[in-house]
Amino acid sequence: MWAHAVYDVSNPAASTIIIASAFIVAMLVCSAIKIANPWERAIVLRLGRFQSLRGPGLFFIIPVLDVLPYWIDTRVIATSFKAEKTLTKDTVPVDVDAVLFWKVLDPKKAALEVADYTGAISWASQTALRDVIGKTMLSDMLEGRDKISSLLQKIIDERTEPWGIKVNSVEVKDVLIPASLENAMSMQAQAERERQARVILGDSEKQVAEKFAEAALTYANNPVALHLRAMNMLYEGLKQNSTIVIVPSSAIDTMQLGSMAGLTALTMGIGQQNANKENEIGKK
């Protein structure tokens, strides 16, 4: 004999059961449908064990049996970190700000091998930065940021590789030093620039002296050239509308300006020059 269960839809209790059952089925179907974005990967656990890695796109799970504890972002992520009041190798306290660019290559390891991979990356970056600062001189840190960035990238990448994370690059943004030390370094840099300027000036004077020595040898072997040079220097000084020119007596004797003929020649030359200037002004 077969027993048949017949529900009377006119019975309010039966209608309630049917509606509740339909609602539960609908909820189970909705919970079984999942959609992952192109940059997302879903970790599926079935009865507490790793089942699969799903995404991107549409996928289905078994309600109640399957759970999704992690949605892993596989895009490149930028994380800022810093080290405050950290002593360098030469015992100078500095504040260093840096940025870490990283991405998840193995979502399974990132979800199962470490509890909070984002927090672990932040702490690993800070400890690595403090280690590097403690082994670096302040001058090397200020001048060689690229070298420090490369070293930090290598250290952090080695620490995060077991977690399925790849460090793309590290960039040191700023290195802050105490104000008193900054003023001292500024004064030191200014003193160094002044020293270099004095060295350059000394080299210039040395080169000028060498050229004067060469010219002196030339004039020593050619008195006529020396006489012409002296006359030219006196003429250049007088033609600038100067009324008084102080000339050593030895130079006057050398140029033979003490004689009447020399003075006459010089006066006539200056007068001719002034006359030419007046004619040019009259024409204008």
Image (cartoon, rainbow, N blue to C red):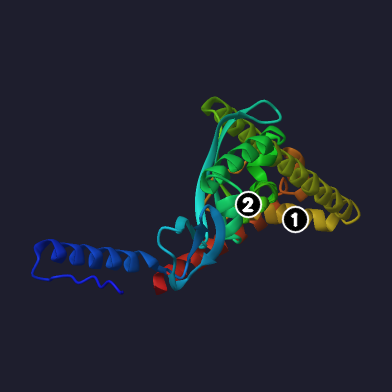
* Residue at the farthest front position: 1
The numbered mark, 2 or 1, whose residue comes first in the sequence reads 2
Horizontal side of residue 213 vs 166, given as left or right: right
Q: Of the residues tagged 2 and 1, which is closer to the observer?
A: 2
Picture layout, residue 122 above or below residue 265: above
The residue drawn where x is 27% and y is 71% is 3
| Mark 1: amino acid | Arg
Residues at marks 2 and 1, CA–CA distance in whole angstroms? 85 Å
Q: Which quadrant holds the C terminus?
A: bottom left
Picture layout, residue 88 above or below residue 227: above
Identify the residue position indicated by label 1 in the image: 229
Residue 163, which numbered label? 2
In this orientation, does residue 119 appear?
yes
Mark 1 element type:
helix
Mark 2 element type:
helix
The residue drawn where x is 30% and y is 74% is 2
From the top left corner, tell me how far across and down residue 11 is, in percent. 9, 66
In depth, the one of 23 and 79 nearer the eye is 23
From the top left corner, tell me how far across and down residue 198 is, in percent. 70, 38
Q: Choose top left, top right, bottom left or bottom right for residue 60.
A: bottom left
Q: Which quadrant holds the N terminus?
A: bottom left
The residue drawn where x is 52% and y is 48% is 118
From the top left corner, tell me how far across and down residue 155 is, in percent. 69, 46
* Residue at the farthest right position: 221
In depth, the one of 26 and 284 nearer the eye is 26
